[in-house]
Amino acid sequence: MKVDYIIVGSGLAGILFCEVLRQHGKSFVVIDDNSQQSSVVAGGLYNPVILKRFSEVWMAKAQLELALPMYHAIEKDLDVTLDYKTPIHRLFASIEEQNNWFTACDKPNLAPFLSTNILPNTNTAIACNHGFGKVLQTGRIHTAQLVASYRTWLEEQNSFLEESFDYNALTLGDTLRYKKHEADQIVFAEGFGISRNPFFKDLPLKPTKGELLTIHAPDLKIDYILKSSVFLMPLGNDKYLVGATYEWKDMSNTTTAKAKENLLTKLKSFLTCDFTVVDQVAGVRPTVKDRRPMVGRHSEYNNMYVLNGLGTRGVMIAPYVAHELYNFIEKQQALNPEIDISRFN
Ligand SMILES: Cc1cc2nc3c(=O)[nH]c(=O)nc-3n(C[C@H](O)[C@H](O)[C@H](O)COP(=O)(O)OP(=O)(O)OC[C@H]3O[C@@H](n4cnc5c(N)ncnc54)[C@H](O)[C@@H]3O)c2cc1C
């Protein structure tokens, strides 16, 4: 079977790259072994503002303009709902934070994303004396739904292999051979799985494990995403996602009592109503030391590529890096130097 591309990994990176290929009429086969969970467990939040410092996320405007139409196209083609547009309310802990918010509102790059009104807190389930600032153009992509629906679609096209990619079974050359498949190009999009990849394992990934809780809080009744020391995201039916943690030593997908405790302590600092924990998940984010994605061609093999390093904001970044890689391979357009793996040479 001959295809244009073999793609290893069907998380956000692999899926969004498939989407770009699909838009251009290219053929592909995707291989995944379910070893990584990042895209399945992710909160899926897209938010153009860093709410700790009130600064703009790297290339936020350009990323959002590209990302949302792509997710909407997938929604239409696969007949699923992925984009839950929801404002974020940033809880102010002090008057000083309110003042910093107004300073941020005056900045031209942030003005489109920040409301200048301070919203008073009227909800007795939330401890908040200084009100909220509302972030605009935000929401949640249901990434677990995206991964599941996309995989079903790939299976229907006979374009999906559920197995661990066997690096020894890849024969290199102008035409690549992998078992019964032949391809012109191969793209590795394995997230933290890159640590097992002999071709790209030396790239400086600095992975970060994250955990999330789902709580049931029938008295909370909020329809916005609340950001305080943790995020609280409405999922419907009085359930909310609480997250996330950051851990640099344990790189398993196993949930821990320590992370649960950490999240509950932070949650209880502003949530005053009763709730129960109904779920806990964990995954490893493919984060990079310089906080930029890792995209590019292998230094020796000119039809082998990497698409990784999506970090903590894969929802917004994946469509952008997928386009960059496609244009690099098919149109010989230079990659943005900030994402090009040649920066590590
Ligand atoms: C707790 C948590 C919360 C998060 N919240 C958000 C959020 O709110 N918003 C946001 O934008 N981002 C969030 N992220 C980050 C986001 O999840 C990541 O940036 C993104 O999912 C990375 O996608 P990826 O495709 O690069 O990697 P992955 O999702 O890890 O996908 C890699 C895929 O490759 C497969 N694979 C790996 N090795 C092999 C192999 N050898 N053979 C076959 N298959 C292989 C894996 O099984 C996996 O399916 C969160 C992450 C975590 C962990």
Image: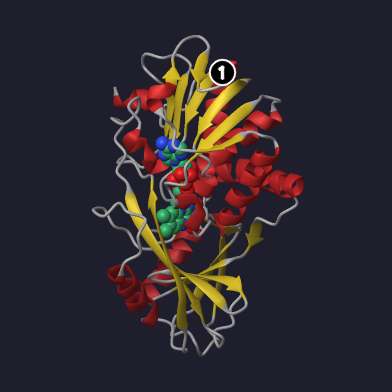
Amino acid carrying label 1: it is Glu
At a point 48% along the width and 38% down the height, the residue shown is 163
Instruction: Name the one closer to the observer, 122 or 176.
Output: 176
Residue located at (56% from left, 18% from top): 182
**Residue 213 percent across, percent down from the top left:** 43, 70
Task: In this rendered view, identify the residue nearer to me: 237 or 339.
Answer: 237
Q: Is residue 264 left or right of residue 24?
A: left
Residue topped by disc 1: 182
Crowding near the residue tagged with mark 1, few <14, some 14–19, many ≥20 C-alpha atoms within 10 Å: many
Q: Quadrant of the C terminus?
A: top left
| Residue 54 visible somewhere in the drawing | no
Which residue occupies the extreme front position in the image? 180
Q: Position of residue 313 (x, y in %)?
A: 46, 49
Is residue 6 visible in the rendered structure shown here?
Answer: yes
Residue at x 50% of width, y 16% of height: 176
Q: Which quadrant would residue 299 be assigned to in this image? A: top left
**190 or 115: nearer the eye?**
190
Residue 297 position (above or below residue 320):
above
> For residue 302, which quarter of the picture?
top left
Please provide percent x and percent y for residue 218: 56, 86
